[in-house]
Amino acid sequence: MVISPVQYIAIPLIAAFLIPLFGKLNKELVRIIPGLVLLYLSYISVVLMNQVISQNTMIVEIIAGWRPPWGINLVFSPFSGFLASLFSMLGFIIWMYTYNFKREVEDAQTEKFYVLMMMLITGTIGIVLTGDIFNMFVFLEITAISAYSLTAFYRERDGAEAAFKYLLVGSFASFFILLAIVLLYSQVGTLNMADIAQKMPDVNPYMKGVILMLFFVGFGIEAEMFPLNGWAPDVYTQAPGPIGAIFAGMVVKAGIYGLVRVIFTLFDVHEIFPLLMIMGVITMAVSEVIALRQGKLKRMLAYSSIGQMGLVLVAFGIGTHEAVFAAIFLMFNHAVIKSLLFLSGTYLVYHSKEKNISDLDGIGKSLPFTSFLFALGSLAIVGLPPFAGFWSKLYILMAAADVRLIAVIAIILAVSVVEIVYYFRVLHRIYFRERISTIEIKIPSFNAKISMLILAIVIIVIGVYPDLISGLIERAATDLLDKQHYIQSVLSVGLH
Amino acid sequence: MNSLILLLILMFGGALFAFILNKFVPALRDIFVVLLMLGVSYLFFSTGISNRLNFDVLGIHMQWGFTSASYLFGIIVVVLGSLALIYSTAYMKGKDRLGYFYMNFLFSIGAMLGILMSRDLISLFFFWEIMTWSSYFIVIYSGNDVDRRGLKYMIFSAIGAYSMLMAIVIVNSFIGSFLLEDVFASIFAIGSGYQIAIAILLMIGFGVKSAMMPLHVWAPRAYSESPMSYTAVFSGALSKMGVFGFALVLFNLVSTQNWLINEVVAWLAAITSVLATFYAVIQSDAKKLLAYSSIAQIGYIIIGLASNTYLGVMAGLFLAVLHAVFKSTLFMAVGAVERQVGTTDMTKISGLIRRMPWTFVATLISIIALAGLPPLGGFVGKWMLYEALITSGHYYLVIMVFLSSTAAFLYSYRILFGMFLGQEEPEFAHVKEAPLSMLIPMLILSGISVLSGSHPGFILEPIQSAMASFGFQSNLPHESWWELTVLFNTWGDKVALVNVLTSIVGVFLIALAFITIKGYKNQRYVTTKDISSSGEIIQPEDNMTFQIDFYKPFERAIWPLLKRKIDDYYTDFGKGLEALFDFVRRFYNGNGQFYAIYVMAFLALLLIAGTKYFGF
């Protein structure tokens, strides 16, 4: 079979709908099929990334024979390809973790879980790969709907409430983005992103501003920007653990991709960059500060995740090449590290009803391996060397210093101190308190341990030798900033 | 492979291996860590200072290699590290989480070597942070009150490290390079406001590690509650990283126009040394006493460095080396008492001199070095410091140093008396001398203290080359100025003092041995008749040694100074912040309708503001 980016969408989507059928054949297939699909996606990621990087091009895939700007096309550029590869590989690792997760739930539920998870991953990969703005909206909806359902997966009151909040705010996002697309179409008469970008200078500036603001708010909701992120903490808390990892590692990243693609490629409004940066600073400061006062582990992780997204927005808002590099690097690091924290944290509070941090007292003795990985993740997320988080933070600070944003540097660093405080408080509880709670302890299954170990190894290896991945990120940053190259590559496809 | 990389791989890989080894073959752990450290020391001494390693990470150019300056500090690190690990094998015997302990121990020593070999700011910071978290994990090892004590250390370290990082990125944005030589070469080309800001930010970072007031509040408990085998390294070597950093900043990044910075640093250091000495005097726990004394001693060192005279800097570095030697001996001795007796509370212990004579000898020698009495090295260092301060006209600083070192006699005597002298208690009759693997490191270090008095040249010679590599050129007439063992008398004759000094030291040692042996044999018990007992009947076994409220009058005299601790201000500030954070938290009230309103309001705001500010 010829490898092409279409398979990123087609295969998991087909697999998602076939999972119930396979379930009729053999119950175990329900759990195995997603893994095979994600493994294949990881494989094609390696092949395609290799092709893109070595040939210094981007792969533009025409669907149904209509060449751009008329048909829908997928763009596997260094940036979108990097994220798609990250999502597939992270998806595979998270699948490995889920393989024996919650064995006790009924089979119908398991089927639903995997169907929704495959749809969620398809949606996020679709958002980053598509070259068509309306198509992006469709994938956003796929992502959103499966995310709503997964939030309420345990069918409890709190889960339903969280899902409802998510639905409420998420429907605003959908509405604003759709409205923006409609207005944009009325102005430029095309839905192809490259074509829009080319025709953007002709748009009436007032209209342009309104459309941009609608996009900004719409994608801002998905990217968990303050004050649009009220839904996020509840969702992270209520969703099953591995799904929390997917939210932090992929769904938010897809939202941020949408935001920056619109800002960097579609529009030519430079005034938006300071706004993006300021919103990033506020998001970061507010949510890290709130994280300090949380009593529940997953809520704390959720706020910390939002804070990191704020930092990503700051870096994108600075907008220099160095800053964009740092932002993408941080997206990668955060995806890996926060997934590790969610995955290991889930086992730390596995049987706890309230998921309180105080339930973690002294758990380090009973769950040494999981606690150790959680500790490692904590050190990494606050940006201590020699772990991966350090380099991305350093680059963001360097980028901020180069444009003399001294106040921003000071805020980022002050917030980092807050981050250290709340993560280390948890570590103190894990290791230096006596265990008093009688909550039963769940030992992670072997495959879960392996998946967490892989993430931990990635964190250490990237931390000690960041150049392993910096080449890819460098190309991704160049790709995002080089708008003309994007337009030319997409619009020239199929001309010959 | 380059020996610098090999050094780090051995340290960090060995640390991880020690952790794993402890899981499977705990019996081999102690031998492994000691052999590893000795091997690393050998490698360190064979590396030398000419070795340079250049490489790029993420497009940042980095350089590793020792200079004479960092080599001097490196010697402290490896010598103390090796001895402390040998000591540790006995001291830590039977405690749990030893894999964790040794892993972090070796990590922090490796990180210190990494700091010293860094020739660029990024690797410096990289290793600095590793040093911070690994030492933090040992600080919380004992597990009591980690939320306050451990977090305090971590928060202050983080504030310090992040101000350093801020300075580093700002420097880079001007100069475009992180290499120390580039930074030193072009720092004075940038605006003077930024210059001062960079120097101050860096010194906040280094000041935290060297526990300078007002950034010292983490230190007393962190020093006193870590295992003593680590505190020996913590106070002896790790705090010297701060001193090393101060030297880098003061000599290379502060221009002579900004002499005020030097003055401020010197005064802060002087206040540190006076107040910390006062605190040390009123402590009744030997560990805390030594912790405060460490803070005070580093004050002298920094006064010396900030005095910006050749002699003063030399005195500062000499005291730095010497402090590493005697203070780690003292921490080891106190650790030995702690292990053999079970407490370090000086109101409880007394009369251990016959039970632990060798520990007493080590303590005595170190105390003499600490107090600055002739003929040991402390005297040499203090003399140089006084002379430097007087000749450069810092009379008020001299008064401060004099005040603090006089008060230091009080606590020096206290520690000697409190633990070793006084009447023997029957409950300590079973106490035995510490095991040999604890005594040998202490006695080796005491030997170095003695040598530092008779032959200070062997320390001053490397210091002189270190100063040259710090960028401090000698402008003095004598070529070998460090050769304090030569006296030029008024007739121009050269008198070799070596013989004189060695004979003084010899007499001193013989006298010491004589007194010790004599005292050992003829201990006189104070009979009840000697004491006024106000009618109470005193049994012969009652201990009449004066121990509680030892320096009460002194405490009363200095009380106004110590009434309001700076620690309380930090605590209040922290509480205020938490209250503020709680207020911010109310934004997320859990109500979905509010969240929807936020979205609409934000969009409305953007659209309104957008027409105004974004020009559409």
Image (tube, coloured by chain):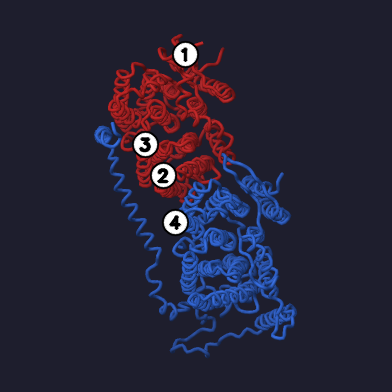
- Callouts 1 and 4 on one subunit: no
Quarter assignment of residue B589: top left
Compare marks 2 and 1 and give the one earlier in the sequence.
1
Q: Is residue B451 visible?
A: no
Residue behind mark 3:
A276
Chain to which the residue tagged by mark 4 belongs: B
Q: Chain of mark 3?
A: A
For the residue carrying disc 3, how many other residues have a C-alpha within 10 Å: few (<14), some (14-19), or many (20+)?
Answer: many
Q: Are discs 2 and 3 located on one and the same chain?
A: yes
Disc 4 element: helix
Question: Are dots 2 and 1 on a single chain?
Answer: yes
Tell us which disc is closer to us: 2 or 1.
1
* Label 3: which secondary element: helix
Q: CA distance from mark 4 to mark 2?
A: 50 Å
**Residue A181, located in which quarter of the rendered image?**
top left
The one nearer the camera, B334 or B186, is: B186
Q: Which residue: 70% across, 51% down?
A: B51
Disc marking residue B193: 4
Q: Quadrant of the N terminus of chain A?
A: top right
Q: Amino acid at mark 3?
A: Leu
Instruction: Kindly identify the residue that appears in the image at 44 percent across and 64 percent down.
Output: B214
Q: Colour of chain B?
A: blue
Coordinates of residue B450 in the picture (x, y in percent)? 68, 73
**Amino acid type assigned to the residue bearing label 1 in the image:** Ile
Looking at the rendered structure, the secondary structure element under dot 1 is strand
Residue bearing the label numbered 2:
A359
Indicate the amino acid at tag 4: Gly
Q: CA distance from mark 1 to mark 4?
A: 57 Å
Kindly report the distance in space between the C-alpha atoms of the residues bearing marks 3 and 1: 33 Å
